[in-house]
Image (cartoon, coloured by chain):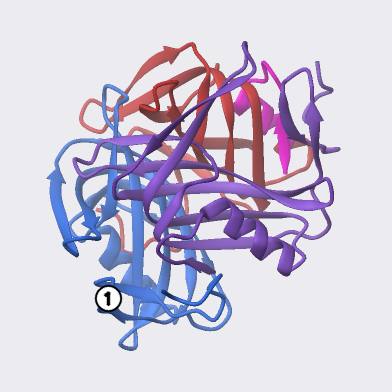
Chain colours: A red, B blue, C purple
Amino acid sequence: MIRLEKGDDILPSLRRFAAKKRIGAGVFEGIGSLNTAKLGHYDFHTKNYKFEVFSEDLEILSLSGNIAMMDNAPLPHAHVTLGKRDFSVIGGHLDEGSLANMVEIGLSSLPGKLVKSRDDEVGLNLLQLRRRLKPAG
Amino acid sequence: MIRLEKGDDILPSLRRFAAKKRIGAGVFEGIGSLNTAKLGHYDFHTKNYKFEVFSEDLEILSLSGNIAMMDNAPLPHAHVTLGKRDFSVIGGHLDEGSLANMVEIGLSSLPGKLVKSRDDEVGLNLLQLRRRLKPAG
Amino acid sequence: MIRLEKGDDILPSLRRFAAKKRIGAGVFEGIGSLNTAKLGHYDFHTKNYKFEVFSEDLEILSLSGNIAMMDNAPLPHAHVTLGKRDFSVIGGHLDEGSLANMVEIGLSSLPGKLVKSRDDEVGLNLLQLRRRLKPAG
C-alpha cells in the first residue's frame, strides 16, 4: 500500500517509487481523491491524444494500471474514473499533472520484468508479451 | 498479463485463453481501448438484459471480472467502464461482440475451481460459494 | 471470493466478514448489482461529505477498496462506479445503506495489519503507512 499526499503528482510519484524499490513489473489499483486531473483520450485513427485538465475535488472511483520498463526506467500507465460533486462521472487516460488530495494505492509487484516499446503502427508504447492471444494483425 | 490486439473479441478471447491454460478460477483487471462495446444492463424485476452497442474509440477506464467454470467450460464475466472522447463515461455488463483496439489484462489464477450454475429465482448464472455472508433468501 | 445476496448492506457485511475471519489488512475488487446506493463526495475545503441515495437497479462497474483496522475493528473503505439502465454512469464513496441485488467480491488478505487513524487536518480517517512517498505536509 502506498499513500500519496496533497499535491503529489500521481505518475511521477509512482515512477520514483518503482525506481527506488527496483520494481520492473507491477499492477496497481487505487482509490482516493484528486484536486486536479489531466485526462487523455487516444484516437486510433489519427494516432493522437486529446487532453483536458479538470480542477476540482474529484473522487477516484477507480485507478487501474500497470508498471513496465521502457528505456531502462519504470513506466507507469494508468486509467482513471472520477466522480464529481453531483455524482456524475468523467474519466480517461491519466496523464502527468494529475494531483492528489489523498490517494491510497495497492501495488502488486510481479516477478521478472514487463517491457514496453514503441509500436509505430499503433502509435503507442505497448507491452511486449509472449502471451498475446493470437499473432498481431 | 495478457495483451489483446485490434479486433479481438474480449470475452471469447478470455474464454479460449482460460481453456488453453486450464484456468478454473480467476479474477482479472484490465485497461486499454475498445472500438466496439456491447453493453448490458440487468433488470432484477423483469429478469432481462437490455443491450446496446457503441461503435467508437472508447478508453477502458476499468475492466473487472472473474472466471468460473460452468458446464465444464471456463466462463468469464466482466463489467466495464468506458471513456468517450469528451471524457464522459458509459458502462455496463460487457457482452460478446466487444472488440479491442488494444487491451492489457492482468489475470490472477486462483487455486481450485469457482463454479457457476443457473439460479432461476434471480435469472442469472451465480457463483456457488460456501463463503456467502449469510444464507440465501 | 465472497458473494452478497439480495438486500445485504455492503459495508457492514464486509466488516462482519473481516471481523469473523480476523482480517486486519486487505484489498478488494467486486462486480455485481445494487438496488440502492448511498454515495458520498468529500469536499477537502469544507471537510464535509455530501450524500445522495439512488434507488434503482445499478450495475456495479467497479467496486474498489481496502480494509484497515481502526479502534481495534476492521474498517472497510470503498469507492464505486455504477451503471444505469441507459448506460450512463454515476459514482462516489460507497456509504452504509448500499444494498445488493447480487455482488461478487474478490478479497485479498494482506499480511500484517493496516491501521487507520483520524487526521484532523484533512478531516478523514487515513492509513498510517511508513511507505508514504514523501513526508506529509
Relative vertical location of residue C33 with respect to residue A69 in this rendering, above or below: below
Q: Residue at x 19, y 40 (%)?
A: C86
Task: Name the quadrant of the C terminus of chain B.
Answer: bottom left
Q: Position of residue C1 (x, y in %)?
A: 54, 69
Relative vertical location of residue A89 with respect to residue B129 in this rendering, above or below: above
Instruction: Tell me where the magenta segment starts and ends, as one range.
Output: A1-17
Determine whether, in the image, residue C93 is placed left or right of residue C128.
Answer: left
Q: Residue at x 64, y 37 (%)?
A: A74
Task: Please tell me how crowded label 1 is: few (under 14), some (14-19), or many (20+) other residues with Cα within 10 Å.
Answer: few
Q: Position of residue C93 (x, y in %)?
A: 52, 36
Q: Amino acid at mark 1?
A: Glu
Q: Position of residue B72 (x, y in %)?
A: 34, 88
Determine whether, in the image, residue C95 is placed left or right of residue C127.
Answer: left
Determine whether, in the image, residue C95 is placed left or right of residue B104.
Answer: right
Q: Residue at x 51, y 43 (%)?
A: A116
Viewer-proximal residue among A56 and C77: C77
Q: Position of residue B11 (x, y in %)?
A: 28, 63
Q: What residue is shown with label 1?
A: B121
Q: Is residue C80 visible?
A: yes
Relative vertical location of residue C84 with respect to residue A4 in this rendering, above or below: below
What is the chain letter for disc 1?
B
Tag count in the figure?
A: 1
Residue A24 lies in the magenta-colored region: no
Viewer-proximal residue among C34 and A44: C34
Residue A8 lies in the magenta-colored region: yes
Determine whether, in the image, residue B86 is placed left or right of residue A54.
Answer: left
Q: Is residue A120 visible?
A: no
Q: Quadrant of residue C28?
A: bottom right
